[in-house]
C-alpha cells in the first residue's frame, strides 16, 4: 500500500461512512471501496465490521489507523522541513546597519556556521537611501524606547566612560558628569547614533561635549584613550573589544547614559524566510546577552 491509499483508509476510518469519505476525498465510491478491499487483502484481514449498511472500525483497523496517522504526520513534517530547507538555500539578506557595526561580522559568522547557504549584503544605513529597494532588515539605535509593529527592541545597554588605566579616574569606579564635562572626547564619526546620543545627554545636563577626533572603529578609539588623548563613551555589551589592560570603564552616576538597539523590517512588505530566521537569531542572542527592553 502507498501513502495515498493510507490517506484514503484514514478518512474512511475516521468517518466510518464510505459515501461521506468518497465525497471528502473527491473520488468515486466504488473506487474507494476497491482501495479498502485491496488494503485488507494485503494485510490478510478485515479492518471494518459490517452492521447492516454501516461500517465500524474493528480492533485491527484501529491498529492500522494509529500507525497510518503516525506515518502520514511524519511525512507532512518531512515535507515541511524540506520546503523550509529549500527556502533557506541560496537565500540572501540585505542588512542595513546604523548600530552593532562593531560586532555584526561576528554575529553573521556565527549565524552562517548554522546556515551556510544564506548570504548577506551589509551596508551602512545611509547607503540604502540611494537605493530603490528597501533593506530586508535594519539595525539602529535610539536614545529612548521605540515601539512599532514592524520592529523589535533587542537590547538596552549602558554607555560607560573609557579612561586610561593609569588615570586618576580609573580607580574611582563612578564619576559625575561635571568632573569630566570639559575633557576631550574621542568619538565615532559625526552623525552616528552614538555621537548624537552623547551630545544630547550632555546638552540636557547643561554641558557641551568637546570632541577632538572622529574615528570609525572602536579599537582605534580605545588606542587613543589608552594614549591619553581623551575619554570615550563606549557601549557596555556591544563593544567588548574595547576592554583591555590599558582601559578602564567608569560609570557616570548622575546621568543615565544608555541606548536602545532595535531591528526593523519594511512596513507591509514580505519578509523572506532567511530574514525571519536571522531576525529571530538576533532576538535570541541579545535576550541572553543583556536586558531586553520590554
Image (cartoon, helix red, strand yellow):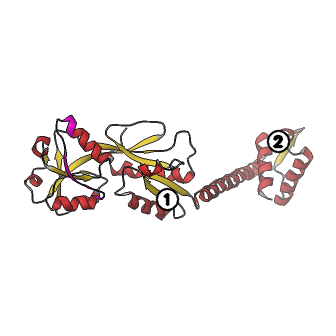
Where, by quadrant of the figure, is residue 246 drawn?
A: bottom left
Q: How many marks?
A: 2
Magenta-tinted stretch: 202-217
Marking on residue 21: 2
Where, by quadrant of the figure, is residue 230 drawn?
A: bottom left
Q: Between residues 42 and 145, which one lies in front from this camera angle?
A: 145
Q: Secondary structure at mark 2?
A: helix
Q: Residue furthest right?
A: 30
Where, by quadrant of the figure, is residue 221 drawn?
A: bottom left
Label pair 2/1, CB-CB below 8 angstroms: no
Q: Between residues 188 and 1, which one lies in front from this camera angle?
A: 188
- In which quadrant will I find the N terminus? bottom right
Crowdedness of circle 1 by 10 Å Cα count: few (<14), some, many (20+)?
few
Name the spot of residue 173 as percent of width and height, x first. Answer: 13, 50
**63 versus 16 height, above or below:** below
What is the distance, in whole Å, between disc 2 and disc 1 at their CAs? 49 Å
Q: Secondary structure at mark 1?
A: strand
The residue positioned 58% from the left and 45% from the top of the image is 270
Q: Is residue 164 magenta?
A: no
Amino acid at each position: 500500500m502507498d501513502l495515498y491509499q493510507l490517506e484514503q483508509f484514514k478518512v474512511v476510518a475516521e468517518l466510518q461512512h464510505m459515501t461521506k469519505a468518497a465525497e471528502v476525498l473527491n473520488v468515486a465510491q466504488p473506487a474507494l471501496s476497491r482501495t479498502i478491499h485491496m488494503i485488507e487483502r494485503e494485510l490478510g484481514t478485515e479492518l471494518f465490521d459490517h452492521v447492516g449498511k454501516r461500517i465500524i472500525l474493528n480492533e485491527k483497523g484501529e491498529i492500522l489507523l494509529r500507525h497510518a496517522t503516525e506515518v502520514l504526520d511524519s511525512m507532512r513534517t518531512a515535507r515541511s522541513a524540506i520546503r523550509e530547507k529549500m527556502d533557506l538555500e541560496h537565500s540572501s539578506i540585505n542588512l542595513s546597519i546604523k548600530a552593532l557595526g562593531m560586532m555584526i561580522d561576528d554575529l553573521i559568522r556565527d549565524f552562517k556556521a548554522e546556515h551556510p547557504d544564506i548570504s548577506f549584503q551589509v551596508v551602512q544605513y545611509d547607503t540604502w537611501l540611494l537605493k530603490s529597494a528597501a533593506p530586508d532588515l535594519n539595525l539602529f539605535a535610539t536614545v529612548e524606547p521605540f515601539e512599532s509593529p514592524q520592529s523589535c527592541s533587542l537590547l538596552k545597554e549602558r554607555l560607560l566612560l573609557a579612561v586610561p588605566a593609569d588615570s586618576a579616574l580609573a580607580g574611582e569606579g563612578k564619576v559625575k558628569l561635571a568632573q569630566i564635562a570639559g575633557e576631550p572626547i574621542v568619538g565615532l564619526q559625526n552623525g552616528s547614533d552614538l555621537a548624537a546620543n552623547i551630545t544630547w545627554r550632555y546638552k540636557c545636563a547643561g554641558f557641551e561635549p568637546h570632541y577632538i577626533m572622529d574615528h570609525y572603529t572602536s579599537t582605534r578609539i580605545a588606542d587613543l584613550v589608552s594614549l591619553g588623548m581623551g575619554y570615550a563613551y563606549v557601549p557596555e555589551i556591544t563593544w567588548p573589544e574595547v576592554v583591555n589592560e590599558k582601559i578602564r570603564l567608569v560609570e557616570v552616576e548622575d546621568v543615565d547614559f544608555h541606548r536602545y538597539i532595535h531591528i526593523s523590517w519594511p512596513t507591509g512588505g514580505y519578509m523572506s524566510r532567511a530574514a525571519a530566521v536571522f531576525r529571530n537569531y538576533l532576538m535570541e542572542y541579545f535576550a541572553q546577552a543583556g536586558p531586553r527592553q520590554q
